[in-house]
């Protein structure tokens, strides 16, 4: 029977290694998101709603400060029922935020150790791509029952 303290040490080392790997992880797709965040928000409301839901109040204040919101704006957002959504809505109102890109916003998240949000965006993108392929495949399968049957046989 393994020693409990030894198992604990091994688990701790494994967790530390995973955290180190995550900290060093890069997001090469980030370069593709050098697009206006407000256009992206309008075209991808589900993604943005998910992002807004993932962020909680305790972690948003330093991010809001890094984005350039002042104390009065942050306090107004904190009084809102949905702080994250209020931050985005507030920024959208002011001219100094009109040129904010998705890339810059995500870089700020990385700076504040919110890589988990980028990982969730990757998962969402993979799921979305899978659903698109499934949709294309099922529409094609309706036209060709043999192809549909073949897929499930092999």
Image (tube, rainbow, N blue to C red):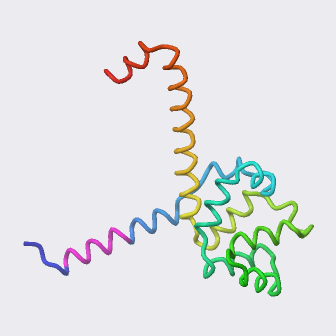
In screen coordinates, is 73 left or right of 50?
Answer: right
Task: State the residue at coordinates (78%, 57%).
Answer: 37
**Farthest left residue in view:** 1
Task: State the residue at coordinates (88%, 68%).
Answer: 93
Q: Nearer the viewer, residue 96 or 104?
A: 96
Residue 9: x and y in percent read 26, 77
Q: Quadrant of residue 4?
A: bottom left
* Vertical position of residue 99 compared to residue 91: above or below: above
* Vertical position of residue 115 compared to residue 27: above or below: below
Q: Nearer the viewer, residue 4 or 70?
A: 70
Residue 110: x and y in percent read 62, 67
Total numbered circles: 0
* Vertical position of residue 58 compared to residue 11: above or below: below
Task: State the residue at coordinates (63%, 62%).
Answer: 51
Residue 119: x and y in percent read 54, 57
In screen coordinates, is 74 left or right of 116?
Answer: right
Q: Is residue 130 magenta?
A: no
Task: State the residue at coordinates (90%, 69%).
Answer: 96
For the N terminus, the image quarter is bottom left
For the C terminus, the image quarter is top left
Q: Quadrant of residue 80?
A: bottom right
Residue 103: x and y in percent read 72, 57
Q: Is residue 11 magenta?
A: yes
Which span of residues is magenta-colored?
A: 6-15
**Farthest right residue in view:** 95
Taken as a whole, is the magenta stretch helix, strand or loop?
A: helix
């Amino acid at each position: 029977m393994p020693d409990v303290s030894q198992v604990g040490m091994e688990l701790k080392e494994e967790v530390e290694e995973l955290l180190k790997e995550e900290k060093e992880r890069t997001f090469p797709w980030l370069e593709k998101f050098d697009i206006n965040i407000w256009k992206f928000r309008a075209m991808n409301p589900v993604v943005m709603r998910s992002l807004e839901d993932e962020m909680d109040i305790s972690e948003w204040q330093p991010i809001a400060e890094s984005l350039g919101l002042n104390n009065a704006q942050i306090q107004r957002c904190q009084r809102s029922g949905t702080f994250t959504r209020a931050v985005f809505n507030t920024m959208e109102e002011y001219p100094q935020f009109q040129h904010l890109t998705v890339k810059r916003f995500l870089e700020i998240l990385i700076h504040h150790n919110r890589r988990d949000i980028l990982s969730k965006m990757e998962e969402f993108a993979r799921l979305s791509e899978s659903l698109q392929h499934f949709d294309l495949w099922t529409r094609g399968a309706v036209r060709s029952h043999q192809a549909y049957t073949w897929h499930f046989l092999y």
